Image: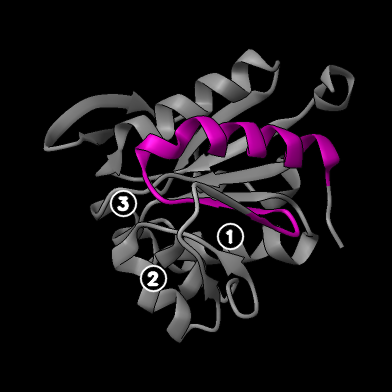
Amino acid sequence: MTQQLEGKRVAILATHGFEESELAVPRAKLQKQGIEVHVVAPEAGSIRAWAESDWGDDYAVDRRLDDVSEHDYHALVLPGGLFNPDALRQDEKALGFVQAFFQAGKPVGAICHAPWVLINAGGVDGRRMTSYPSVAQDLRNAGAEWVDERVVVDNGLVTSRKPDDLDAFGSKLVEEIAEGRHG
């Protein structure tokens, strides 16, 4: 699989208030596989994490959303939290970025509340998915089949429920990135 991951680049799209572990853990797992990972955000400089019950660390933004496109990356990861996906699902540039990955058939990973962004990007209808339980009805209303499982893969879309599922989420992300584009 190492050969299949050679030269791969992944964008992690986030803004202030992302759940810290949901960015840090997948990024570390992908980097350990030799994948180049960029934190992409609407703003330059740094973004602040939410760490379970209070503000966490600041994370450097590698690329501004205005300066990248889906063509620069092989896959996209969306961390959850409450503030982060709520802001991104109202950002037209962020939604366009996410839509481009779906249109290109590239792997997309979303955990916790991040499927809110996928709903607004129009990427969930007819998909089998999971999320944080409070997002389940939103997904059903948008046409997804919601299931309560650690990780769900549907044609390149990887979803998980919460930080406790990060190990399974990261492993499936790596597999989907190695497989590449999906039809």
Q: Are marks 3 and 1 in contact (CB under 8 Å)?
A: no
Q: Is residue 144 left or right of residue 127?
A: left
- Disc nearer the start of the sequence (3/1): 3
Question: Which of the marked residues, 2 or 3, is nearer the chain's N terminus?
Answer: 3
Q: Residue at x 70, y 63 (%)?
A: 102
Circle number at residue 84? 3
Residue drawn at point x = 38 percent, y = 52 percent: 112
Q: Bin the neighbour count of mark 2 within 10 Å (Cα to Cα): few under 14, some 14-19, many 20 and up.
A: many
Quarter holding residue 97 = bottom right
Please provide percent x and percent y for residue 43. 36, 44
| Count of labels in the image | 3
* Type of amino acid at the residue the image marks with label 3: Asn
Residue at the extreme front of the image, as rendered: 148
Q: Amino acid at mark 2?
A: Ala
Instruction: Please state the extent of the stretch shown in magenta in the rendering.
Output: 153-180
Q: Decide: few, some or many residues near mark 3? Use Cα within 10 Å; few <14, some 14-19, many ≥20.
A: many
Foreground pick, 9 / 54: 54
**What secondary structure predominates along the stretch shown in magenta?**
helix
Q: Residue at x 84, y 51 (%)?
A: 181
Amino acid at circle 1: Val
In which quadrant of the rendered view does residue 77 lie?
top right
Residue 46 seen from this side: no
Q: Secondary structure at mark 1?
A: helix
x then y, percent, for residue 92: 46, 69
Examine the rendering and report whether any part of residue 129 can be seen.
yes
Question: Is residue 30 rendered magenta in the image?
Answer: no
Front residue of 89/147: it is 147
Q: In the picture shown, does residue 72 fall above or below 25?
A: below
